[in-house]
Image (cartoon, rainbow, N blue to C red):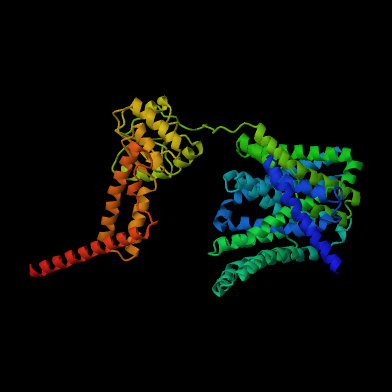
Amino acid sequence: MAEANANDLTQVVVLLAAGVAAVPIFKKIGLGSVLGYLAAGLAIGPFGLGLFADPQAIIHVAELGVVMFLFIIGLEMQPSRLWGMRKDIFGLGAIQVMGAMAALTCIGLSFGFPLIPSFVAGTGFVLTSTAIVMQMLQERGTLSTLKGQRIIAILLFEDLAIVPLLAIVVLLGTGGAATDASDRWLSIGIAIGAIVALVLAGRYLLNPLFRVLAASGAREVMTAAALLVVLGSALAMQVSGLSMAMGAFLAGVLLSESSFRHQLEADIEPFRGILLGLFFLGVGMAIDLSVIAANWQLVVASVVGYMIAKILIIYLVARMLGTCHAESLDRAVLMAQGGEFAFVLYAAAVSAGIFDGEDNAILTATIIISMVLTPLMVILHDRVVPKQQPSTEGLTLPENVEGTVLMIGFGRFGQIVSQPLLARGYTLSLIDKDAEFVRDAAEFGFKVYYGDGSRIDILHAAGAATAKAILICVDDKEAAVKIAQIVHEEFPLVPLLARAFDRGHAIDLIHAGVDYQLRETFESAIVFSRETLKALGEDEDLAIEVVEEFRDVDRERLALETVGGIYAGRQLVRGNAQPADLVAARTARERAAAEEERERREREQQEEAG
């Protein structure tokens, strides 16, 4: 017994050591963490050092990492947001899956295999690896972007599709005819009932449960409850014949508007990361080199044929639905592999008599190799394909525009600035070099011209020469200084006002010739400080006086720094390092408050006497 426990502990240590050793190395050389885990798994698996004999057991446990990943994604998907994605899920997702199924079935037929095995083999490859795609989206920082959300929508449809596909495999198998229609309807009813039960539990039970647990103050119980919600919802879906990942995702969506959302995410994240890493390690171990060696021609042909066909279909569907070339190609490369759900589908096909053990091993090897190749293809794509320049199709360039005010950059800062000016009837000439934003601004009633404010020809075309004021509101520090220098030299008589990021940037803008600059957080911080003084019990008039006094000190400090550098006004900064200074400041404040109180009483007495 002791030896068995020691052996289990040894395997755990080996798994952790393999991941810890391989992933930093692969990330350092630019190959990413997924490929690092896969390589580490191959190294310690049956066909490497032979430290593990049953990688499938590890994969089954580590699939919980995928489940938890989907739960966290669900937490970011409010129901309203998910409803807004319905066209992508059931439109884009359905078209891509149907098209890829047809194309990959044809690949199997071209190899000389019968229709039904070709269909099942191709359909399994259509189901993309959620784990790999999600991990790579996260590493590339595109998970929350619009193109990332479209990929998530397709993955969600594939998750939904696994249920009818499993039913189809059973029907196509040798035992399909013996399946009673009432049993099939019963299975469908159970699945629908499980979804309804999960939705009702999410809406009416989970939030009260977490409120009670939070009131207890036991942090470990909250963590246990988070795991219970994820694993319980996954188990409910699996028992009802649906996908575990779908159950976890649905639970996440139901809790996405809960006040405990961030707590749940923080509790689940460590488990998700470790288990997802174990999943990739298990996939690497499962690469059966003996099967690949015995059938290498078929395996290579299947990998190449399936991946090329899937890339073409994904690209063509994306282009057909109006997606630009760069995003279409990026999506096609990222989703070119088969996924973990294919293992489930192929296992069902073996049970149904469609495949034998060797067929399953060959197809499994095909899926795993495609999963291994995907990170390499993505890296190659990112390095070879040039960065996409923003499309200016449909955008209006400035030409003989005249406005009272020329605003360069129309982001969150410029939009607020524009409102009082427009309210007073001034005409604005707006230019911005973010093509997507220019398009989006039109939906809110703004006419924004596409153009780079650092180009003299664009400035002339946008009406800089006739403007009564030029405002620099761009969110790029270097670009703002460059624009200020150009405008000051080319249009010296036009008042120039600029948005600054910090004191150093403000000084650079002053040197560049701006007439007025404002640090973007200065006024909001001033107001915030004033309200804090009031919240602490200070009189409102005194709070205003203190804030105005600070304005004068800050103005004096900035003047010193403009001449002598950023450290020239240090003596005017109030710090908290010296207790004596704090006591003096407090005494001065109390003295001022007493003086204010004395003056108030004198005014009251005069009013009574009058």
The residue lying at 74 percent from left, 47 percent from top is: 22
The residue lying at 75 percent from left, 65 percent from top is: 239
Q: Position of residue 396 (x, y in %)?
A: 45, 31
How many numbered marks have been drawn onto this rendered protein structure?
0
Question: On the picture, is 241 further left or further right than 230?
Answer: right
In this view, the residue farthest toward the left is 610
User: Is 200 in front, or is 17?
Assistant: 17
Q: Quarter holding the C terminus?
A: bottom left
Q: Quadrant of residue 254?
A: bottom right
Question: On the picture, is 43 further left or further right than 459?
Answer: right
Q: Quarter holding the N terminus?
A: bottom right
User: Is 165 in front, or is 575?
Assistant: 575
Q: Position of residue 430 (x, y in %)?
A: 39, 36
Q: Does the rendering let one see residue 46? A: yes
Q: Quadrant of residue 160?
A: bottom right
Question: On the picture, is 399 further left or further right than 136?
Answer: left
Q: Position of residue 196 (x, y in %)?
A: 65, 66
The residue lying at 86 percent from left, 66 percent from top is: 3
Q: Relative to residue 224, is residue 49 depicted above or below? A: above
Q: Relative to residue 448, is residue 522 depicted above or below? A: below
The residue lying at 14 percent from left, 66 percent from top is: 602
Q: Position of residue 68 (x, y in %)?
A: 67, 59
Q: Does the rendering let one see residue 462? A: no
